[in-house]
Image (spheres, rainbow, N blue to C red):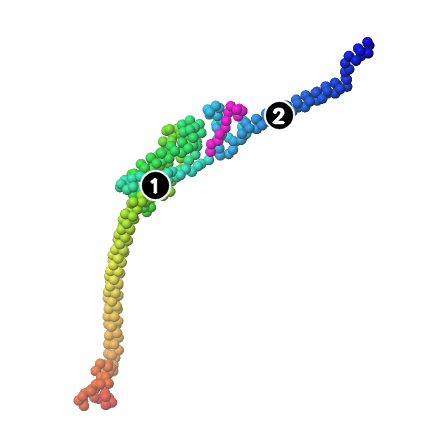
Amino acid sequence: MSDDKKSDSKVFDFSTQKKNNGSSLEWKKYSKLGITLIVFFILLITAILNVFIVKEGEYRVVRQFGEVVKIIEDPGLNAKIPFIQSVTSLPKYQMTYDVSEAEINTRDKKRIIIDNYSVWRITSPKDMISNAGTMINAESRMEEYIYSVVRTELGQLNYEDIINDEKSSRGSLNDRVTERVNELLTKESFGIEVVDVRMKQTDLPTENEQSVFTRMISERESTSQEYLSTGDANKNRIEAQTDREVRELLAVANAEADVIRAEGEAEAAKLYNESFSKDPEFYEIYRTLESYKTTIDDKTMIILPADSPYASLLSGALE
């Protein structure tokens, strides 16, 4: 009976149970370490994703549930609340916007197509977001104001004054347009500022180009002919004045020459008289010889009385 009791009793292996308990404790230890590492990495990634850098030349807009709660302008490292706040950026530097071409009428009822561009920047991100919403909307409103002001300003000028640089009366048109557009933007509190507005080019509608070009050519030809006529008139006037001055100078010179010549002849006659008075006979011979110069040449035939002075001289008889 004792043998039956022995066979019915259970046998426990305590070494196996101890080993199983050790494995369970070790597994729990590694599980806690793994969970700790996972939580640490999740927290680290969350922190990294919710830290942002503000760079030079940009605004950072912090929104909470879509509402702007903070605008950061200074460069540096900043953080936001995870899953609640979001961050967007807006440019702080100056930007260029190409205004669409538009057709306007000048004061003299001419149609022209103008093409402008503007340089602008954001001055108040909060006002821009509140009143314009986005940069695209801000640019659209700016373009409307630029077109309106340019149309008003150019509508006060004639077509010739706009396209002709030599006679242009535009003056500080760009400055006036810029100032007026900024007044409108400030009044509406759009938070942007136009730095400059410039006109790239001015074109004519296609149907008007040929007629305007023909008229311009005619005007240029008329102007050139006017210049030529003025030049010819000035040339004739200068030549006539020069001829008159030459004649006056020659008359004065001739008069002075006549005076000098007369004075010389008078002085010579005086000297001759003084010289000839010293020897009358020599003077008589001299006068006779001088008369030969005008009365005798190689074809002259002279018939003289035998007792004439000429005959006596020619025959060599001198007494």
Q: Is residue 296 left or right of residue 199?
A: left
Residue 127 in sight here: no
Q: Is residue 60 magenta?
A: no
Q: Residue at x 32, y 37 (%)?
A: 151
The residue lying toward the viewer, choosing from 42 and 149, is: 42
In the rendered image, the vertical position of residue 185 relative to residue 301, given as above or below:
above
| Figure check: 316 above or below 124 | below
The residue singled out by tag 2 in the image is: 38
**Mark 1 is on which residue type?**
Ile
Residue 206, image quadrant: top left
Residue 112 horizontal/vertical position (percent): 31, 42
Secondary structure of the residue carrying numbered label 1: strand
What quarter of the picture does the N terminus occupy?
A: top right
What is the count of numbered marks?
2
Q: Is residue 291 above or below residue 233?
A: below
Q: In front here: 265 or 128?
A: 128
The amino acid pointed to by label 2 is Ile
| Left-right relation of 87 to 288 | right
Report the magenta residues as a range. 80-91
Q: Which residue is mark 1?
A: 114
| Image coordinates for residue 201, horizontal then vertical, percent | 36, 43
Q: Quadrant of the C terminus?
A: bottom left
In front here: 297 or 63? 63
Identity of the residue drawn at 25% across and 56% down: 233
Residue sitting nearer the eye, 118 or 282: 118
| Residue 186 image position (x, y, % from top left) | 38, 30
Tell me the element at label 2. helix
* Outermost right residue: 2
N-terminal-most mark, 2 or 1: 2
Residue drawn at x 26%, y 41% as measured from the top left: 108
Task: Give the residue at the far left of this rendering.
Answer: 305
